[in-house]
């Protein structure tokens, strides 16, 4: 897995999505000195290339001058190369920013939950229009943009409309399930129950297999690949600890963006240029190791442990009132979708012209017939 550093310029956000727990009004703003320290901290820190994701809150609040300085500094750091992505609602993008993101190959993910009416019901009046305006600006500068679609306890009942909206426009998506939060209760009533989540994934996978040529749903590509190679290829399906860190606006280092702003999860600060060993001495690291140990024991009889690894530690700790001795409460959803994928794969093998190890792979998905799960497993 690539070494991943998430940069959180601020937790502030101009939007007011009903179920959001990741933003904090009035949060501080990262200055360029922090980026300079990030570059010094990462010098000789790891062997792998680094992928930086700007996340928030709303990262574009940091402004064009910040990105004009930050991108070249990060790009030219003394490590094995750097890639970039940005997660933003795109309300604040303009031509200058879009061109800069194009020039640095920044891949953008933006959040839309489906058709305008449904999206604005969940994310607030006017959200859809502002985000789609930003999308058009980004596209005009040839920036790669994909969508993040969050399913809630409300939108799960409209999954057909949501799916058709993205497929009809040819928009590629990543799926999120609305989650409860450790930071406030706002999100709880929108959160998807694990069984609802599993059921939704199975229904969406079925629809996806009908038109792989129209749309890409990254989660299913990863889930199927993970089952096939028996190793998780998404952070939630692997041991994420140590493979990802997040840096808050003040330079504090956390295990992941989900923990940013929670003092008990601060592992160090970029100003001190901590080594991996320093970070491993923090109570937050110890907490995550306890999670890992718990998973090794609790999930050891599960058929899916190799490519699930207990799911997301944030979800687990959150659901267990701050204790790491738990697995992700969406375990039931993971089991449902992994079983569905495995059953489909077994059926494909029985019926099929599937290549055995060592044989050549099918070249392309036949657009005129429903794809098989093996088409997804072998997708490049
Ligand atoms: S804590 Fe959860 S979201 Fe964060 S990197 Fe780990 S698995 Fe991914
Ligand atoms: S599906 Fe559930 S039991 Fe199996 S590894 Fe994942 S969290 Fe553990």
Image (cartoon, rainbow, N blue to C red):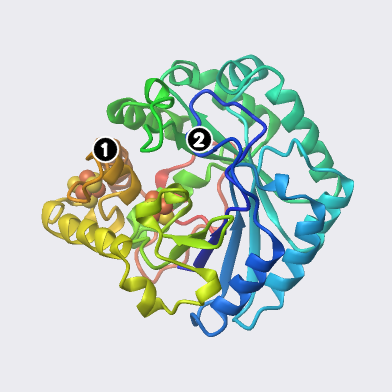
Residue under numbered circle 1: 319
Find residue 41 and report its horizontal and vertical position in percent: 55, 77
Query: Is the CB of mark 1 within 8 Å of ligand 2?
Result: no
Q: Is residue 207 left or right of residue 267?
A: right
Residue at point 67%, 49% (across, down): 108
Q: Foreground mark, 2 or 1?
A: 1
Looking at the rendered image, the quarter that the C terminus falls into is bottom right
Mark 2 lies on a secondary structure that is helix
In front here: 334 or 278?
A: 278
In the drawing, what numbered circle is on residue 208?
Answer: 2
The N terminus, quarter of image: bottom left
Q: Residue at x 37, y 32 (%)?
A: 180
Q: Can you tell which mark lies on residue 44?
A: none
Task: Please tell me how crowded label 1 is: few (under 14), some (14-19), or many (20+) other residues with Cα within 10 Å.
Answer: many
Residue 171 vs residue 7, the one in the foreground: 7
Residue 71 location, quadrant: bottom right
């Amino acid at each position: 897995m690539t070494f991943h550093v998430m940069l959180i310029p601020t937790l502030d956000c101009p939007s007011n999505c009903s179920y959001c727990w990741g933003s904090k009004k009035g949060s501080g703003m990262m200055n360029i000195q922090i980026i300079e320290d990030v570059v010094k901290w990462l010098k000789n820190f790891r062997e792998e290339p680094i992928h930086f994701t700007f996340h928030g809150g709303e990262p574009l609040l940091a402004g064009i001058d910040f990105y004009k300085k930050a991108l070249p500094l990060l790009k030219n750091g003394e490590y094995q190369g750097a890639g970039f992505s940005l997660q933003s609602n795109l309300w604040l993008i303009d031509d200058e920013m879009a061109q800069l993101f194009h020039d640095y190959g920044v891949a953008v993910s933006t959040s839309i939950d489906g058709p305008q009416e449904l999206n604005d019901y969940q994310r607030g009046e006017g959200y859809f229009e502002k985000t789609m305006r930003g999308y058009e600006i980004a596209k005009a500068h040839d920036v790669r943009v994909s969508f993040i679609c969050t399913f809630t306890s409300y939108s799960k009942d409209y999954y057909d409309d949501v799916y058709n909206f993205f497929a009809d426009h040819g928009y590629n998506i990543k799926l999120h399930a609305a989650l409860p939060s450790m930071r406030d209760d706002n999100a709880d009533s929108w959160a998807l129950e694990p069984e609802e989540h599993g059921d939704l994934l199975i229904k969406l996978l079925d629809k996806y297999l009908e038109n792989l040529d129209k749309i890409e749903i990254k989660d299913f590509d990863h889930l199927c690949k993970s089952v096939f190679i028996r190793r998780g290829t998404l952070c939630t399906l692997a041991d994420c600890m140590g493979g990802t860190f997040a840096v808050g606006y003040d330079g504090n280092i956390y295990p992941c963006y989900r923990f940013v702003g929670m003092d008990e999860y601060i592992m160090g600060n970029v100003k001190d240029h901590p080594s991996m060993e320093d970070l491993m001495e923090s109570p937050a690291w110890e907490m995550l190791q306890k999670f890992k140990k718990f998973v090794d024991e609790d999930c050891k009889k599960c058929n899916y442990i190799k490519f699930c690894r207990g799911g997301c530690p944030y979800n687990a700790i959150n659901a267990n009132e701050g204790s790491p001795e738990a697995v992700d409460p969406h375990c039931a959803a993971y089991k449902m979708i992994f079983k569905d994928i495995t059953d489909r794969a077994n059926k494909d093998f029985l019926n099929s012209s599937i290549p055995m190890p060592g044989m050549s792979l099918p070249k392309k998905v036949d657009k005129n017939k429903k794809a098989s799960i093996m088409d997804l497993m072998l997708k490049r």
